[in-house]
Image (cartoon, grey):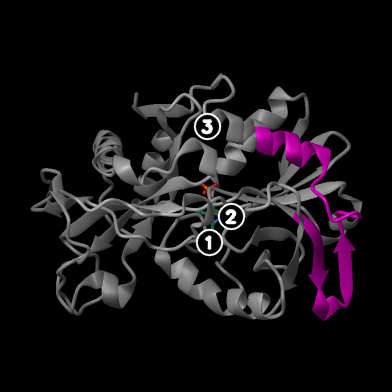
């Protein structure tokens, strides 16, 4: 008998909570093996593994939601499967086949069903797939063996008081997250190591996150923290086109929903000065869906772009947010077939 859970779902943070099982698959002798299930939270690893020295690591982040109808849905997992395959190939790791990825996601969610927060709580089950090179070697070259793991952890609602507040962001000119032809388009741990200093400094100064400019010219808006950026003006959804941003699945979904709502969509370089003309703006990603932006400061240029005059999310951000959440929770019709129902 497992001990009963005593979790305050609505007040969970974005932390790690142990669950019953995780699932794993090893790549050896040029092929992926059988899926394994374990209760161990540890990975036995050689100290000379390539992931530890040369950063051969890629990951994903997705969520499972308990719907209004009691069913459990995972949002767009085919997109996460494709993206981790691209991230892996970007740093010379073998791609996990899409079918294997999806099978493992379903398994790990079902095995940990008792950790899926109830619908009313606003919380969800965060799903974290990751892949690491584990071959012991000292020379700089790709590993021969890899481990692919998926674990889950219940996480609280991002907006505890509801979707009502906007927050400030700060442009960093001292740091770049990724080079124009670097690894910015891949979801790899190395990009996060490169962003930690800027992120900590932004938080210490009271901002939600740091905002990167394009690394080459420092003229165009790139990404904010670990989220994509979009702005709204003249009935148009505008999001940066850049060779160093991570292709967000939330952004891709919001683009589709914006089109469905009759907005025009523009993907193009967004010069910093254009911030002054935006009616609304948001940071988007799996964690928050949309984090509405109050203002963006550029301390080194001594200027501030105030986007939300009243400190509240604008009507377009609110509509987009409610539509995406509604689809994820089974409250609205899933017209684009984005959900996989994992538990009926
Ligand atoms: C994961 C991530 C995002 C958001 O992607 P989603 O698929 O929407 O969760 C944005 N930027 C970076 C750098 C990321 O790592």
Whether ligand 1 has any atom under 8 Å from the Cβ at mark 1 is answered as no
Name the residue carrying label 3.
329
Instruction: Determine whether 188 is above or below 137 in the image.
Output: above
| Corner quadrant of residue 296 | bottom right
Q: How crowded is mark 2: few (under 14 residues within 10 Å), some or many (20 or more)?
A: some
Q: Name the residue under label 2.
A: 243
Element on which disc 1 rests: loop
Mark 3 crowd level (few <14, some 14–19, many ≥20, 10 Å Cα): many
- Secondary structure beneath disc 3? loop
| Residue nearer the viewer, 338 or 241 | 338
- Decide: marks 2, 1 in contact (CB < 8 A)? yes
Q: Which residue is drawn at 77% across and 24% down?
A: 262
Toward which corner of the image does residue 326 lie, by quadrant?
A: top right
Residue at 28 percent of width and 40 percent of height: 101
User: Is residue 142 located in the magenta-colored stretch of the structure?
Assistant: no
Q: Percent x, y for residue 273?
A: 87, 60
Distance CA(mark 3)–CA(mark 1): 38 Å
Q: Position of residue 40 (x, y in %)?
A: 17, 61
Q: Earlier in the sequence, mark 3 or mark 2?
A: 2
The span from disc 3 to disc 2 (Cα, nearest Å) is 33 Å
Find disc 1 in the rendering and name its residue: 181
Which region shows up in magenta? 293-322
Q: Give the vertical position of 21 relative to 316 (above or below).
A: below
């Amino acid at each position: 008998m497992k001990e009963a859970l005593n979790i305050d779902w609505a007040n969970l943070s974005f932390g790690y909570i142990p669950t019953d099982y995780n699932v794993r698959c090893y790549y050896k002798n040029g092929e992926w093996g059988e899926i394994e299930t374990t209760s161990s939270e540890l990975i036995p690893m050689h100290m000379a593994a390539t992931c530890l020295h040369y950063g051969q690591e890629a990951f994903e982040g997705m969520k499972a939601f308990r719907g209004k109808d009691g069913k459990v849905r995972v949002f767009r997992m085919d997109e996460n499967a494709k993206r981790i395959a691209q991230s892996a190939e970007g740093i010379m790791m073998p791609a996990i086949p899409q079918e294997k990825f999806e099978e493992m996601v379903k398994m790990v969610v079902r095995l940990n069903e008792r950790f899926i927060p109830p619908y009313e709580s606003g919380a969800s089950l965060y799903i974290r797939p990751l892949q690491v090179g584990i071959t012991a070697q000292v020379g700089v070259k790709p590993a021969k063996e890899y481990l692919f793991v998926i674990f889950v952890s219940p996480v609280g609602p991002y907006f505890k008081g509801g979707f009502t507040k906007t927050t400030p962001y700060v442009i960093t000119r001292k740091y770049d997250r990724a080079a124009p032809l670097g690894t910015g388009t891949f979801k790899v741990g190395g990009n996060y190591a490169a962003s930690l200093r800027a992120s900590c400094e932004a938080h210490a100064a009271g901002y939600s996150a740091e905002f990167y400019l394009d690394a080459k010219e420092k003229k165009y808006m790139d990404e904010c923290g670990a989220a994509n950026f979009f702005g709204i003006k003249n009935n148009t959804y505008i999001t940066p086109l850049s060779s160093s941003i991570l292709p967000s699945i939330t952004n891709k979904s919001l683009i589709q929903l914006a089109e469905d709502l009759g907005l025009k969509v523009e993907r193009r370089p967004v010069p910093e000065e254009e911030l002054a003309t935006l009616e609304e703006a948001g940071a988007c990603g799996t964690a928050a869906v949309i984090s509405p932006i109050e203002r963006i400061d550029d301390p080194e240029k001594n200027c501030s772009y105030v986007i939300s005059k009243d400190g509240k999310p604008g009507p377009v951000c609110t509509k987009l947010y409610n539509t995406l959440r509604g689809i994820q929770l089974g409250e609205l019709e899933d017209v684009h077939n984005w959900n996989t129902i994992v538990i009926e």
